[in-house]
Image (cartoon, rainbow, N blue to C red):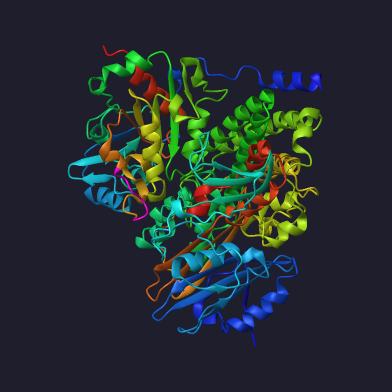
Amino acid sequence: MIFGKAKILRSHGWQYIPDLNGVTLTEEFRGFPILSNSDDKAALERAAKICPTQAITTSPLTLDLGKCLFCGECQRCAPKSIKFTNEHRLAATRREDLIVKVGDTAPKFDYSALRPEISKYFGLALQLREVSAGGDASIEMELGATGNVNFDFGRYGVGFTASPRHADGLVLTGPISQNMAEALDICYHAIAEPKVLIVCGSEAISGGLYADSPAVERSFLDKYHVDLWLPGAPTHPLCFIDGVMKMRSKIK
Amino acid sequence: MNLYKITDNRASAVAIADIPVVDYVDLYNDLKERMTDVRYHVAHYFATEIERGLKFYMIILDDQSGEVLITSFVPDYYAEGLASLTAIHPQFHPFEREMWELYGVEFTHHPWLKPLRFAHNRRNKESTMDSYPFYKIEGDDLHEVNVGPIHAGIIEPGAFRFICMGEEVLHLEIALGYQHRGVEDEMVRIQNRLRQSVISESIAGDTAVGHTTAYAEVIERLAHCNVGASLQRERAIALELERIAMHLADTGALATDIGFQLYQVACEALRTVTINTTQAWCGNRFGKSMIRPMGSNHPLTEAKIETIRKNVTDVRRRYNEVREDILEAQTLLARFEQCGLVPKAEMYRIGGVGMAARSSGALRDIRTTHPWGHYATNITHNAITQHDGDVMSRLATRMEEVLQSADYILAMLDGYKPQGDIAQPNYEPELDKESLSFALVEGWRGEICHVALTDSEGNICKYKIKDPSLHNWLALAIAVRSEGISDFPINNKSFNLSYCGHDL
């Protein structure tokens, strides 16, 4: 038996990623899009029309990462106008900063929008309560993965906790189903001040595919201040880690 | 009289005119007898609004012959109600509950006529999540434990109500619906086939490949499109990769719940390798964007084939070491064996499907009974079954299926050269008018069934989705009866059912 366990240990070796900030994802990964003006207006119109969440405007050309599900179809329709890079760092502090324009070369993370108490109180440790309100399980699994043996976000004092009473903030996933709206609100209020609110995944940010569904109820987001917006379908663990690290850093 | 239109899981869509419209009494009497034979089970049963009242469709599977039996009926508009099939065959319960909740259809003598998911378009808006009529047992020695809707971990919401005597669970009732997003309505609201594909990926995000494969099959059967052997092969590779990834996740989750950290971290690492392989193939760790109707945006290349081959070989070897050690770990076996039993007969009675049913010895595997695509032409699938129906059986099924799926993938890649014969997806095919198209796919949890109805313009006017969880949640409730309440987590993980796939 001991021999079997030794074999497993030897086969697995060291699994953690030493430098979480130094990772470059596979070329296939669709992250931050670079937009360019091109003559092929018809192609761009086709891309905007087929977009499942209507995330694209054509004049001027913009792409809303808060709606984008990163299916990549617009790039295939209009390769001269839209090109996804493998940049996974997509976090923003303001909703409007998620709208990518022509000429943008990197995601905009505006440190000036951060509340100073976040780094003061949560700079060393941050415990979060996750609430799924219509999330499709992939995003919940990715948040779970942030603490796994590879990403090990716990090394920076960040983790997820069961009780909102023990939490410093709430991570929201899913388009906010009507049937979860009340439980979400109760959970948010059970967290003591000061607290952070992180909205994770394009479905949570804009409602995504369900933005116009009568089964969702999104007034929660009109009521409370959001500190961090994290696009993705689902949000990659490294995008979450990058965003939370930036949110907690001392403002220069 | 012919009660059914008989077809199979490879045929094209069926014209609605070819589906018999029968008398419910005749159908009831036939099913009363027929469903006592375990070779049959119900795959789908739903109602759709017609000009005057409702039209009902039912799909029955014959596991022995591979036939699919489709029927329909239109009850008299003034009829008082329908005799409940659930009363004699409990496997019908979620379907009858759904129709009662949505349209107010009265199923007489239904033993458990309760809301299914509190859909936004339910008939009785007074009935809300907060007023779910939980079963009650009175007694001084009893207490109730309520868990949810928000759970301790990072998982989806659902409410569990236990009635316990001391530590022992007498009864568990599971109230779902918190995840309801209106998926089926969104599928028909906009006829954008790309959007429908992406919605399919979000039905249950951990089964993105499974559900989108079912959607693509539904469309292709309406468009009379044969996508070719290469694409069918690549879809099967993606589906088996998804199965491996989720079985690894669940092996790790079961180990976590008994504090067995070595297996937990080993499985976390192996799952990372597996889903990163999927990401290197299509750009998404869950296989979103992988499956599209009538073609693919991510045909395999020689380099990708090599990556998959290398990683799957490595995962198989390393996971097998974990598996061999698990089988000798007495502390683990002491927790998992003879815990959470669902006997085979019970599994058949409630219509259990997929790996949970197989763990109880009930052979429910679409890859064997109703093969489609690559499984129909190139694989003679030997479904893995166990005898005991306990937590350990469900873990054992997972462990064996990881190795089996890895072997399938390696065999499918063996000698496979990309021919460049895979088309681009087609989002604007012409679809058969006034037809019913269904697809059955064996996802990692079990039987996925999608059904589409088209109107006289060839638009999809009704879309019905069934995730295997719809059948299997009841199995979890049965499994924990007379177990200690502290064994609930390992039972729950041993099934790992989908909340959003159930709630839609």
- In the picture shown, does residue B44 fall above or below A112? below
Main SS type for the magenta part? loop
Q: Which of B432 and B369 is in front in this view?
A: B369
Nearer to us in this view, B135 or B272: B135
Question: Residue B322, image x and y in percent?
Answer: 73, 29
- Foreground of the two, B93 or B59: B93
Q: What residue sits 70% from the left and 21% below the top?
A: A11
Looking at the rendered image, the quarter that the N terminus of chain B falls into is bottom right
- For the magenta stretch, what is the residue range? A214-219
- Residue appearing at x 31%, y 39% in the figure: A66
Quarter holding residue B363: bottom right
Q: Is residue B284 visible?
A: no
Q: Residue furthest bottom?
A: B1
Residue A218 forms part of the magenta stretch: yes
Vertical placement of residue B455 versus A179, above or below: below
| Residue A142 magenta | no
- In this figure, what is the number of numbered marks? 0
Residue A206 place in picture, x, y as percent: 31, 43
For this orientation, the residue located farthest to the front is B140
Residue at image point 37% right, 14% down: A123
Residue A12's x, y, as percent?
A: 66, 21
